[in-house]
Amino acid sequence: MMVLTRPLAALGAVVLSALATIGHVTLFALATFRHIVTPPYYVREYLHALVHVGYLSLPVVGLTAVFTGGALALQIFAGGSRYGAEEVVPQIVALGVVRELGPVMVGLMMAARVTSSIAAEIATMKVTEQIDALVTLSTDPMKYLTAPRVFAGLVTVPLLVAVGDTLGIFGGWFVSMNTLDFNPSTYLKNTVDFLETPDIVSSLVKGAAFGGIATLMGCYFGMNSGRGAQGVGRATKTSVVAAAVLILAANFLLTQAFFAT
Amino acid sequence: MISLDGVHKAFGSKEILRGVDLNVARGESCVIIGGSGTGKSVTLKCVLGLITPDSGTIKVDGEDITATGDRDAFLARFGMLFQGAALFDSLPVWQNVAFRLLRGSLKRPKAEAKEIAIEKLRRVGMGPDVADLFPAELSGGMQKRVGLARAIAADPEIIFFDEPTTGLDPIMAGVINELIREIVTEMGATALTITHDMTSVRAIADKVAMLHRGKIRWHGPVSEMDTAEDPYLHQFITGSSEGPIETLR
Ligand SMILES: Nc1ncnc2c1ncn2[C@@H]1O[C@H](COP(=O)(O)OP(=O)(O)OP(=O)(O)O)[C@@H](O)[C@H]1O
Ligand SMILES: [Mg+2]
């Protein structure tokens, strides 16, 4: 009997702990939003977070976007030419980058760069009792550490997505112009004519959602880190995996919400 | 002023505190001694609300700590030196010391806060030149002293010191012992100190409490410590490996 029930029990335990985590993360997110909208505001922490989450992510976002846009143009040209439809490159690049690749690439780069560094930093603070010290100094760690970072994610990642979209299209344009013999100005005109407001809005909304997810996961797993160096390592790893999976899942849901008719 | 009554705390299946009863009067300096890992740091953290006890009550000024409405106001009365100093490594030394003075209800102009920070650093034997360094640039003993300066920066009524002299040279340890004594006698603060250093116990304690196996094994005035009958206490203060406290070798 035990042999039969044991796998079920294990499965049940996994499901229960997953549900508990979802509940905890939800409460954590709600508490964070409450702290973002209620004073006191630690201005210095907010500025610091804006610079670290947003500004310093620009190079990596720019580079990934340019290369991805370029590669996309080559593939669309290759695929399109089989049907004599090479001229759709600007339109499809624009659509692919703005609706999907731009936000997803930026989101995943945020998980790699921002989630990991937030989780490692906060987990280390937890392990070295700095979080406890904050509490004894009458400072709420949620307000001092989490709120500024999540705010920075929500605000700067849409801007990063806008930059990523632009540079992704630029990458496609550059490749098309140099190796695929497109006319540069016609290419740009086709791109601009084709894109519609909902495309751009969806891109920015996705950016805000992914920025929120990336920073929240870093803070949540950092704050709940286990003890010792191992605890920090585990918190960092889990936060990045959770952020990446949630970003891709959220991307699917948002695409469905915006474009499924 | 601080009273613990039947405080229990277990981490998983590991019972750490098994009914701690302790009273510290206003203006008194109480020292907790006891073997490594007996839960001395956990006891302090329970009083500060950083760890929630499984059962038992903790009162400060007769009020249950879980019932205090305004946690900020409650914590503003305390200063705490953590065993590992727990300095914020993203901030320079002086901002660590003046942390409380730069934000919240005790906020004051930056220049004034820095002045106070430098004065507190001086009291723990550190010059103004360290004020702009970062914690990572300091030695362990220096970090400890910065932590001490931070604990006393806002002149709290109640101060907790978790091993204030560990990692310091004997002369500096003497300076810190004197400082703690001064804070209690001159400022009328209530102090609860954890230490393994018997010189320190004799220098700063009015009252000594020994934690063993999750309970207060012995407590009394420091003057009675040497003549007490308790074999556990006797073994501890003489540092003998022979006695009722088992040592694994
Ligand atoms: N957050 C925690 N989670 C799990 N176990 C803990 C936690 N905090 C403390 N412990 C355990 O509780 C026990 C007592 O810890 P504590 O830090 O209070 O010891 P201590 O008396 O201060 O010892 P030392 O003199 O070495 O500092 C230890 O076994 C420790 O592993
Ligand atoms: Mg300890």
Image: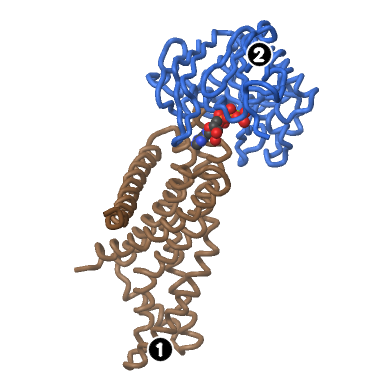
Chain colours: A brown, B blue
Q: Are marks 2 and 1 on the same chain?
A: no
Q: Mark 1 is on which residue type?
A: Ala
The three-letter code of the residue at mark 2 reads: Ile
The quadrant of the rendering that contains the C terminus of chain B is top right
Residue B132 in view (yes/no): yes
Q: Nearer the viewer, residue B165 or B38?
A: B38
Please tell me whether residue A26 is drawn above or below residue B103 in the rendered image. Answer: below
Element assignment for label 2: helix
Q: Label 1, secondary structure: give it.
A: helix
Q: Position of residue A29 (x, y in %)?
A: 36, 44
Q: Position of residue B219 (x, y in %)?
A: 58, 11
Q: Is residue A150 left or right of residue A60?
A: left
Q: Is residue A197 above or below residue A25?
A: below
Left or right: A235, with B31 as reference point = left
Q: Nearer the viewer, residue A237 or B37?
A: B37
Near-viewer residue (A36 or B245):
B245
**Residue B110 in view, yes or no:** no
Residue, x 48% and y 82% (percent of image)? A175
Real-space Cα distance between discs 2 and 1?
79 Å
Q: Which label belongs to residue A78?
A: 1
Residue at horizontal 53%, vertical 64%? A60
- Read off the residue under disc 2: B183
Report how many numbered discs are placed on residues in the image. Answer: 2
